[in-house]
Amino acid sequence: MYESLFQPLTVRGLTLKNRIVFAPTSMGLKSGDFLAHIDRIARGGAGLIVIGDVPVLPSPMFSLYTPEGLDFYRQITQTAHAGGAKISAQLHMSDSDVQGLQRYLPDLRAGRITPDDLRRKLNDLTGDFITSLPVERIQTIIDGFGQAAILARDAGFDMIQIHGDRMCGSFSSSIYNHRTDAYGGSPENRARFAVSCVQAVRRAVPNMPIEYKLAVRQEDPHYGNAGILADELPVFVPLLDEAGVDCYEVALANHGALTDTIPPHNHPYFSQPGCFLKFCDLVRPLTDRPLCGVGGLGDPDFAAAQVDSGRVDYIALSRPLIADPDWPRLVQNGQTDQIFRCVRCNRACLGGMQQHQGTHCVFDEKRRAARGE
């Protein structure tokens, strides 16, 4: 009954062995532990692993632009390939006002504000940052997407994912983008930055598949401040298709509480399985490109039914593969009763990340004991 999940999927000449993706996830692990995690996910049977937040420009943090950074990314791709998975680099450009952030750091260190408070304050600065960004800087960033794609290819990545939230999503959003030039105003203008980034990647790596993480903003009730409104999708999606996007991961726009984009089982609005699939339903009539669904897809029967029906073409899992990296292998072997299933508690995954303890699962010890790991 799970045959559809294990049919190969070919995108611009790249064949994934199945329809199961490990979604980009902030792990907060040391390099050796991170490589071990990638190895475990690959050996567990995922067809594609997406490495999140790969910087578009040279960065004081870890990046493709230093010999050490490029070497580590090569270790990541080699580890994934050795485990039988393909691997994608999520090209990321922050929309955080780093200079504006400085004013809040004393309060954070003194405990007068929490990390969540800081996140909200950073989000509040985004609109002014995007609106005042010089055109010359915008072009540098666009060019950086192309250069980063070349470096990612050289590091061994098989696919590029363009992070359509963060800066791309903020340029897309009428909440944050108040520009009056060619990058602001109408939906066509607000799409220009994202479209230009896709075009830069397509020129740089013409034979690599490009996945676009399409961030959809919801109203009534309101969730997400960046991203694209439902009634703007008929403008944005054809422009992105024409620019060179080969497939889409469709998700809720960010810039709100982390528990909105990583919703727990008791979320007031996104508690149900497949909580973000309705956004795929909005995109499906607008493109013939494959769509990846995400959000509450840890139940194999439910996930397979979404692919069977054609609602989505492949699925992205994060917390379910953190809870049990063997999820794909066990599903394929008909051993679903042996899966340690994510209960969407967010205690050791999102909670671990927020507490700077690394992203883990409450079932880690129990699973390792049961599997002799």
Image (tube, helix red, strand yellow):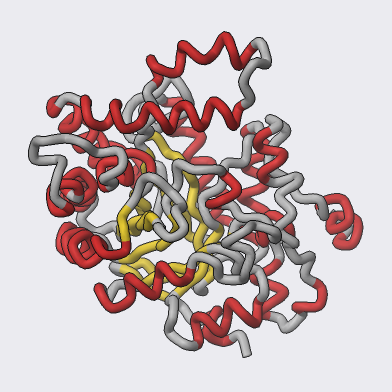
Compared across the picture, whether 33 is left or right of 139 comes to right
The percent coordinates of residue 359 (x first, y second) are 68, 42
Does residue 84 appear in the picture of this structure? no
Task: Kindly identify the residue that appears in the image at 73 percent across and 83 percent down.
Answer: 334
Give whichever of 233, 143 is nearer the camera: 233
Give whichever of 109, 92 is nearer the camera: 109
Does residue 311 appear in the picture of this structure? yes
The total of numbered circles placed on residues is 0
Compared across the picture, whether 184 is left or right of 253 comes to left
Q: Is residue 366 above or below residue 126?
A: below
Give whichever of 311, 330 is nearer the camera: 311
Q: Is residue 302 above or below residue 252?
A: below
Residue 213 occupies quadrant: bottom left
Compared across the picture, whether 290 is left or right of 348 comes to left
Task: Kindly identify the residue that appears in the image at 60 percent across and 56 percent down.
Answer: 318
Q: Residue furthest left?
A: 182
The percent coordinates of residue 53 (x first, y second) are 45, 40
Give whichever of 9, 72 is nearer the camera: 9
Residue 219 occupies quadrant: bottom left
Task: Kindly identify the residue that appears in the image at 35 percent across and 43 percent down.
Answer: 154
Q: Quadrant of the N terminus?
A: bottom right
Q: Is residue 12 above or below residue 142?
A: below
